[in-house]
Image (cartoon, grey):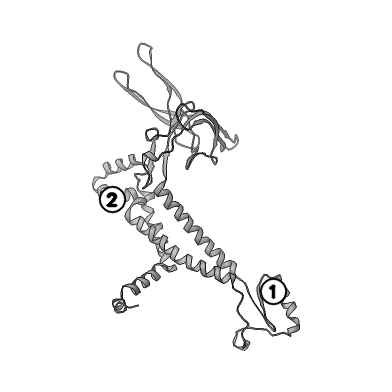
Amino acid sequence: MSNDDLRELSALPLLRWLWRQLTSMRTALILLMLLGVAAIPGSLIPQRTQNPMKVREYLAAHPGLGAFLDRLKMFDVYGSPWFSAIYILLFISLIGCVLPRTMDHARALRKAPPLTPRNLERMEGFAAIDSGNLDLAEAWLCKNRFRIRRDENSISAEKGYMRESGNLLFHLSLILILIGVAIGSLYGYKGEAILNVGERFINTPTSYDTLSFGKLQKESSLQPFIITATKFVAKYDPATNAPQDYSLTVDTAPEVGSSSKSVLIKVNKPLGYGATKIYLQANGYSPVVTVKNSAGDIVFQGPVIFLPQDGNLTSTGAIKIADMKPQIGMVGSFVP
């Protein structure tokens, strides 16, 4: 369609033409490629939703470039308007492309095969047999899973619908995944907290180490619950040192003062409170540290969380003692 033709179109035909272009398979493939390219900065540049400290360090180290990237929303790629525009256009394109094809395919599945043509000579390949052998032909076609339509002196049969069914099922599954991601980004939230065995966690924003909400979520929408870690067991393969099983036993209650119950949490077996799922994500060590002053008095004693740095759980941690004069801070390494 030329530019002159587009100028002559009224609003409704122009919108119809734009809709056909958007819902074409070519446009969907282009948008899918653009989505993959647009996601690359999110893996190369630190993101505020994942590591805000890295973002602050980057801005401090590169003030000019950092400010420019910040205006382009490069530190919040997956929530930026341009990434959302590609995502939404791809979503609309897939729906407009797949749903009409799915409905047409469903109608075709319910239809009988077309009538046998009167003039077989016009077809590229055909075979004619005596009408007395139609029963044998029908039996062979049924055995080979053809859809059959038998008339008085002919049989028409067809097959191959499973190929289109599989193609549509794949694209419908992709649409469902996109819907799930969209709902999760709007109404979901994700938080992480490190908990020592024996400590209690109350589901409030201040209890999390990191916490991010969806666009339509608020702090007041957090599901109330309390969990206390009572026992953690990790099993490893002695030969390869590969982990075999992690299990965490917790006492859980819906609110302070209510009765609690013991629950076992595993890697693929989360604890559920309404729509909230509590997963066991990782584990590490919290060495018990004792610090004494020059007089021999204990000024600090207790477990200190050390963060694993490799597969052998070699860990590093910081010990801060604010009550001493002068205040003391130490960085240590723990080798299991």
Give the mark, 2 or 1, whose residue is nearer the N terminus: 2
Residue 267 percent across, percent down from the top left: 53, 39
Indicate left or right for 64 with 249 as reference: left
Near mark 1 (Cα within 10 A), the count class, few <14, some 14-19 or many ≥20, is some
Q: CB under 8 Å between callouts 2 and 1? A: no
Q: Dot 1 lies on which element?
A: helix
Whole-angstrom CA distance, mark 2 to mark 1, is 64 Å
* As drawn, 53 above or below 35: above
Indicate left or right for 224 with 15 as reference: right
| Foreground pick, 260 / 44 | 260
| Foreground pick, 291 / 81 | 81
Q: Please give the name of the residue rendered at 67% of the width and 70% of the height, measured from the top-left corner.
A: 145
Q: Please give the name of the residue rendered at 69% of the width and 71% of the height, measured from the top-left corner.
A: 144
Point out the residue furthest to the left here: 64
Q: Which residue is mark 2?
A: 69
Q: Select label 2 or label 1 by which is in front.
A: 1
Q: Tell me which amino acid carries mark 1.
A: Leu
The numbered disc on residue 141 is 1
